[in-house]
């Protein structure tokens, strides 16, 4: 629940830095700030004042810059004061403590952004854009989040919403006056237009979700195939232990890399074989679990040894999954093999073929999505857009106008959820709790 008092938090990361920003928002923000700053600074809004931060005994704590944003022209839509202390933990913490001593309450995670949403400064898609910018792990993900933050998703979703509303209105008129002129409304072509707009928006959002969430790529294969060597080669560092003893890796090892803008969580696993050893058997169980939960499987084969029956069986089990057969040890004499999926020849030892493997991982991860036009969304919002498309498509094929009208209404509600215009407190709690304190 939103409280309407005055809140404060440190909005920058704590640590050694040039400056730290303490943000105060709410009806009493200016009063609180004036109690802890020297002189009556902050008279003019949106102007930086060079002043001093004073403790309760009137001693100077730090030389600071302070600025006031008058409501509603502020991030939260309320009166906001930002105080820029010098970086370092103590000055920033002291400033926050002074603000709290003088009437502000410590902000909850995401509370500034939640207030911006509640006060109509941004909609939910833009709030997700804020989170996307903060969490972006690649420049492509950053651009996708910035496009959402500046309202591209909101504009498109509003346009779709308004068009559905218009079609719904026409239908109601048609239902009320079946003989009237309104019978000429061409609902079908209107719905076709909405369907194609939705399809293109969903494809942009799918791209954005891949950029934001990334994919989990699991490296599997028989012992000694070179899985850990491949993991290290892709990471460019020695993360996993490599030996010529089969059964070296027992546990799951995870590390992240970015492949052409896509965050990839790489997982190395224990070599797959029957084992009496309790620890190794548990490693194999975890490996199989990781493969089934992962998005993409790299099945590593020692190409100098060729395919074994166990490899064939495992490869058959991967049918229908996103998988690449990695023919490793290409620096040795390779045996010709036939596999039921895309294969790529690499040497984890020399690095040969790794760029080709990365390109294949990228292609499998992005699928049809055009990453350069991605829009940042949460999985929940993408689900809402898909539900909307399903309802509009069903409406297009509905047997009568009553059913069409009902389906259009539920399609419209799905778009409203993307924008957060139909979100209850519980949903908002779960969304904004993912933010950090101070945002
Ligand atoms: N010549 C050559 N040897 C390799 C290559 N990749 C791995 N090896 C060797 O193969 C052996 C096994 O490598 P690992 O990476 O430990 O194999 P693994 O699949 O992780 O093995 P387990 O953890 O036991 O399942 C080591 O001696 C590596 O040096 C390669 O591309 N070429
Ligand atoms: Mg290993």
Image (tube, rainbow, N blue to C red):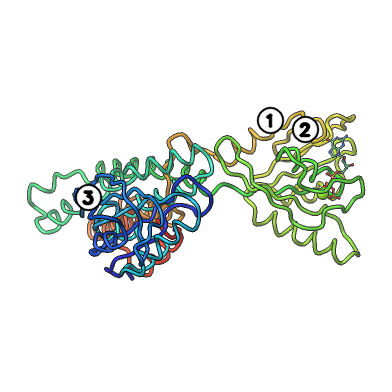
Reading the chain from its start, which is encountered first: label 2 or label 3?
A: 3
Reading the chain from its start, which is encountered first: label 3 or label 1?
A: 3
Residue 382 in view of the camera = yes
Residue drawn at 33 percent across, 42 percent down: 150
On residue 346, which mark appears? 2
Q: What separation in Å lies between label 2 and label 1 (alpha carbons)?
A: 9 Å
Is 193 in front, or is 35? Answer: 35
Q: What separation in Å lies between label 2 and label 3 (alpha carbons)?
A: 57 Å
| Residue 215 place in picture, x, y as percent | 59, 47
Left or right of 74 in this view: 301: right
Mark 2 burial class by Cα count in 10 Å: few <14, some 14-19, many 20+: many
Q: Does the numbered disc 2 mark a residue whose Cβ is under 8 Å from ligand 1?
A: yes
Left or right of 436 in this view: 229: right
Residue drawn at 72 percent across, 32 percent down: 354
Q: Circles 2 and 1: CB distance less than 8 Å?
A: yes
Q: Which residue is mark 1?
A: 356
| Residue 78 place in picture, x, y as percent | 24, 58
Reading the chain from its start, which is encountered first: label 2 or label 1?
A: 2
Q: Which residue is mark 3?
A: 73
């Amino acid at each position: 629940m939103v409280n309407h008092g005055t809140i404060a938090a440190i909005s920058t990361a704590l640590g050694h830095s040039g400056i730290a920003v303490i943000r105060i928002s709410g009806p009493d923000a200016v009063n609180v700030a004036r109690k802890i700053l020297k002189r009556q600074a902050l008279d003019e809004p949106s102007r930086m004042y060079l002043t001093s931060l004073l403790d309760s005994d009137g001693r100077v704590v730090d030389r600071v810059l302070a600025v006031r944003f008058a409501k509603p022209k502020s991030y939260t839509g309320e009166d906001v004061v930002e105080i820029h202390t010098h970086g370092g933990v103590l000055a920033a913490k002291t400033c926050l403590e002074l603000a709290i001593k003088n009437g502000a309450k410590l902000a909850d995670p995401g509370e500034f952004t939640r207030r911006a949403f509640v006060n109509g400064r941004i909609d939910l898609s833009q709030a997700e854009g804020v989170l996307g910018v903060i969490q972006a792990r690649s420049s492509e993900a950053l651009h996708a989040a910035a496009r959402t933050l500046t309202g591209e998703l909101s504009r498109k979703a509003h346009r779709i919403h308004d068009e559905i509303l218009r079609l719904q209105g026409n239908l109601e008129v048609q239902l009320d006056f079946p003989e009237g002129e309104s019978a000429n409304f061409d609902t079908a072509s209107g719905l076709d237009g909405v369907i194609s707009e939705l399809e293109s928006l969903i494809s942009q959002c799918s791209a954005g979700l891949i950029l934001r969430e990334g994919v989990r790529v699991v490296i599997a294969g028989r012992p000694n195939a070179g899985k850990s060597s491949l993991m290290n080669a892709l990471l460019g560092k020695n993360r996993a232990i490599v030996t010529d003893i089969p059964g070296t890796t027992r546990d799951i090892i995870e590390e992240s890399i970015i492949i052409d803008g896509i965050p990839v969580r790489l997982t190395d696993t224990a070599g797959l074989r029957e084992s009496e050893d309790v620890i190794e058997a548990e490693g194999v169980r975890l490996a199989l679990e990781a493969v089934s939960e992962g998005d993409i499987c790299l099945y590593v084969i020692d190409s100098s040894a060729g395919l074994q029956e166990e490899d064939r069986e495992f490869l058959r089990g991967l049918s229908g999954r996103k998988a690449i057969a990695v023919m490793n040890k290409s620096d040795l004499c390779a045996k010709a093999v036939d596999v039921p999926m895309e294969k790529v020849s690499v040497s984890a030892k020399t690095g040969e073929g790794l760029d080709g493997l990365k390109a294949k991982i990228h292609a499998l991860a992005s699928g049809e999505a055009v990453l350069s036009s991605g829009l940042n969304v949460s999985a929940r919002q993408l689900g809402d857009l898909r539900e909307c498309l399903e309802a509009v498509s069903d409406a297009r094929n509905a047997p009568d106008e009553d059913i069409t009208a009902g389906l259009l209404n539920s399609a419209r509600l799905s778009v409203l959820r993307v924008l957060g215009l139909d979100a209850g407190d519980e949903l908002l709690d779960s969304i904004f709790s993912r933010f950090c304190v101070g945002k």
